[in-house]
Structure formats: C-alpha cells, structure tokens
Image (cartoon, grey):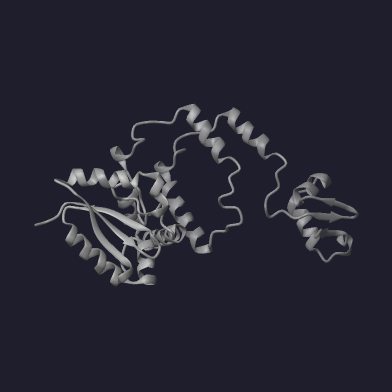
Amino acid sequence: METIGVYKISNNKSNKYYIGYSCNIDKRWKRHKRDLKNSTHCNLYLQREFNKYGIDAFKFEIIHKCENKDEAKNIELEYLEDLSIRNELYNLHFNNSGGDMLSNHPNKEEIIKKRSATMKLNNYKLTKEERSKKYGKPGKKNGMYGKTHTKEARLKISIANKNNKYSVGRKASLETRKKLSKIQSVLQKGKKNSFFGKKHSLETKQKIREKKLGNLPTNSRKVKIEDKIYNSLAEASRHYNVCTATIFHRIKSSNPKYINYNYYN
C-alpha cells in the first residue's frame, strides 16, 4: 500500500535535515537515494553532505502519515515556513509550489552566468527568420499594435536614452558596416523611405542651414599660408576670394611663388 505523508531525511553528523512530502514515500526515497549515489541530486546541499559522510550518516523517516495529498502539502508547508528551523533545513526553497530552485542555491551566480552564456550561444545560432519567429511579435500579436506613445511617454524614453553610453568604445567591424549599409539601402529606397514624396519646409531648411553653419567636414585639413593658419581650404579660399581648387593647386604647385602655401599638421 502506498504511503501518503511528510518525510524527513536527517544527517546525524550535522543535525541538518530535508523535509518533503509524497503520495508514495517509499518510491520517493528510492529516487532520493539513487540520485545521491549517482551524484545527480537536484539539492546541492544534500548532495555535498552525502558525498562527505556517506549513506550511513542519513536517516529516512516518516514524520506524518496523511489521508490525501493536500493534507501532506499543508503539513510540509508548515515546516518550510517555520523561520525557527530555517537554518537547519537542506531545502533550497521554502514553499511547496515548486519552480524556484535558484534563489537559495549556493552556486547561484555561477548558474546565472552559465544560463546567460547558453542563451547567447543558442540565439547566435538562430537565423534571422528563426529569431523573429521566436521573439518577434508582428501585427496584432504586438502589444503596441494600433497604438502610439503619448508625448509624455516619448519624453520619458528620450530622457532615459539621453547620453547613453551603450556603444562607447565599440566599433562595428567592416563586415557589420557593410551589412547595415545594405539593409539601409533596401529599407530607405523609393516608397520605403519615410520621406518619400515629401519636402522640407523653408523654415526647416533654414534651421538645418543654421545648425550646420560653421561645421567642418570630417576630411577637412588645416592650411597655412604665409604665417596664418586657416581651418580649411574653403576658409582660405574665402579669405583670398578664389575657389578652393585654386588654393589646392597652389599647395601642390612646385612654383616658388607658392612656397608658403602648405597643409598645416
């Protein structure tokens, strides 16, 4: 006959014990012993003590026989929630709903790192389509489908992301830049471009012009003519009232007349 109830696995060397319930205690004990002998028990505390002291140090006993599963669960829960014996228990979690075997695990940080590494590796192996199918929520499945953020929400998002340093010090590889360029060339082509068929207003054009005023191109070089230094070819050309090409040719010229035209390093 199967025994329903609450059982106790005690270590007579450390005086610590494990509390559990089962609808078939004999069968449950056999599984505990098998896992402990094979060093595969899910409770690392209990496994370590078993490895240290051996089976003879442990006592298996039934402390409550019950009429049904619910009665056994309730009695077990009374033990697990009793703070006065908390330090004496091997149990990794203190409820009988199951699930959380991590919060009180002695190797918690190591487990989290391993899980994170495994997830990253598995996601790396997924194709774009597989990743989209697994994590994406297109159309009506998306929680924001048919909705837009309020001005207040957009402001909060903007503030939260302002001055973020997620990519500081990082540089995309040449291969990655080529992929991004290819994607953008497809996404922003023709009607797919969000600005397709639109034009900037005169007011917007003026704002863009004012914002860019005084900005130097990334490839600009300083120029030294006589004893004066100019920030760019354009600045020098404006000063001498000639085109930039003229300044450029004078710098490159072997004519002694332009010996004082040089790039300034």
- Answer whether residue 39 is visible to the viewer in this image: no
**Residue 40 against residue 211 in the figure, above or below:** below
Q: Residue at x 29, y 72 (%)?
A: 37
Q: Position of residue 13 (x, y in %)?
A: 39, 65
Q: Is residue 182 left or right of residue 131?
A: right
In the rendered structure, the answer to whether residue 265 lies left or right of residue 211 reads: right
Q: Image height check: is 151 above or below 8? A: above
In which image quadrant can residue 162 be found?
top right
Of residue 48 and residue 161, the one placed in the foreground of this image is 48
Residue 195 on image: x %, y %: 47, 38
In the rendered image, is residue 221 in sight? yes
Q: Nearer the viewer, residue 62 or 149?
A: 62
Q: Residue at x 45, y 60 (%)?
A: 113
The C terminus: image quadrant: bottom right
Return the x and y of residue 144 as percentages of the image width and height: 36, 35
Q: Is residue 63 left or right of residue 238?
A: left
- Give the x, y percent position of residue 222: 78, 54
Q: Quadrant of residue 105?
A: bottom left
Q: Residue at x 31, y 50 (%)?
A: 99
Q: Name the residue nearer the viewer: 241 or 41.
A: 41
Report which quarter residue 29 is drawn in. Answer: bottom left
